[in-house]
Image (cartoon, helix red, strand yellow):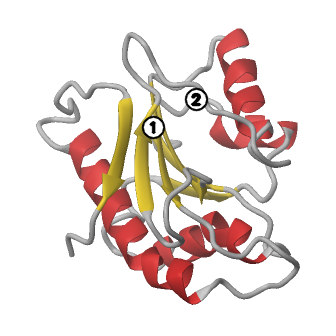
């Protein structure tokens, strides 16, 4: 049976910090808090081929580099659930694919009930395969927030407390 929760890491590994989502999900594959609860997907630069990967998930957690105008390495949590969900703005090539992917799923009657994005503010977006020190250092905070979100979704018999839409800047709480 396919897990009802999917964690989708997106990004371009050739553009330094833009690959943060991919680096994060690779670390999450080795995290005991995550493995048995969710399906972990390396989404690359997002395309329609991901429809099959996230089809049928009830809850989708996206991990990505997010330009929120904050200092590099700052982590954010954005909730796209609720009565008035935020919109994902397209600021680079793969982010334009996330809204399209979610729209396609909704049109096909397979849209997840809850969508949360855990992101990290990039510092370096030029050619390169290494993360900046600030973003590399933030991956532990990203992993901890992913684990907390999974706990929210799976605690209390699988019915997490009602969350409101919004953006939250995360601080190190490990």
| Tag shown at residue 106 | none
43 versus 102 height, above or below? below
> Which callout, 1 or 2, points at the residue further toward the start of the chain?
1
83 versus 105 height, above or below? above
110 versus 66 height, above or below? above
* Label 1 close to label 2 by CB (< 8 Å): yes
Which residue is labeled 1 in the image? 4
Label 2 packing within 10 angstroms: few (<14), some (14-19), many (20+)? some
Residue 165, picture quadrant: top left
| SS for dot 1 | loop
Quadrant where the C terminus lies? bottom left
Q: Is residue 93 left or right of residue 41?
A: right
Give the image location of residue 170, x and y in percent.
Answer: 32, 58
Taking the spot 56% from the left edge, 68% from the top edge, the residue there is 25
Taking the spot 50% from the left edge, 25% from the top edge, the residue there is 86
Which residue is labeled 2 in the image? 56
Q: Is residue 31 left or right of residue 154?
A: right
Mark 1–mark 2 Cα distance, whole angstroms, equals: 7 Å
Q: Is residue 92 left or right of residue 59?
A: right
Farthest residue in the left direction? 156
Give the image location of residue 49, x and y in percent.
Answer: 85, 42
Give the image location of residue 113, x and y in percent.
Answer: 45, 22
| SS for dot 2 | loop
Taking the spot 71% from the left edge, 20% from the top edge, the residue there is 103
Give the image location of residue 76, x and y in percent.
Answer: 42, 53
Residue 54, picture quadrant: top right
């Amino acid at each position: 049976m396919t897990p009802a929760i999917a964690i989708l890491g997106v990004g371009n590994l050739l553009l330094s910090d833009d690959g943060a989502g991919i680096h994060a999900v690779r670390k999450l594959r080795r995290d005991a808090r995550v493995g048995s609860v969710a399906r972990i997907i390396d989404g690359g630069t997002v395309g329609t081929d991901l429809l099959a990967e996230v089809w049928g998930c009830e809850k989708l957690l996206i991990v990505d580099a997010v330009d929120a105008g904050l200092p590099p390495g700052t982590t954010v949590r954005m909730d796209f659930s609720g009565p008035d969900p935020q919109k994902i703005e397209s600021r680079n090539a793969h982010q334009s694919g996330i809204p399209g992917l979610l729209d396609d799923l909704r049109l096909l009657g397979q849209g997840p009930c809850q969508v949360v994005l855990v992101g990290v503010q990039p510092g370096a977006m030029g050619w390169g395969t290494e993360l900046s020190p600030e973003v590399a250092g933030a991956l532990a905070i990203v992993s901890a927030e992913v684990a907390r979100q999974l706990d929210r979704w799976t605690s209390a018999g699988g019915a997490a407390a009602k969350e409101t839409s919004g953006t939250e800047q995360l601080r190190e709480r490990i």
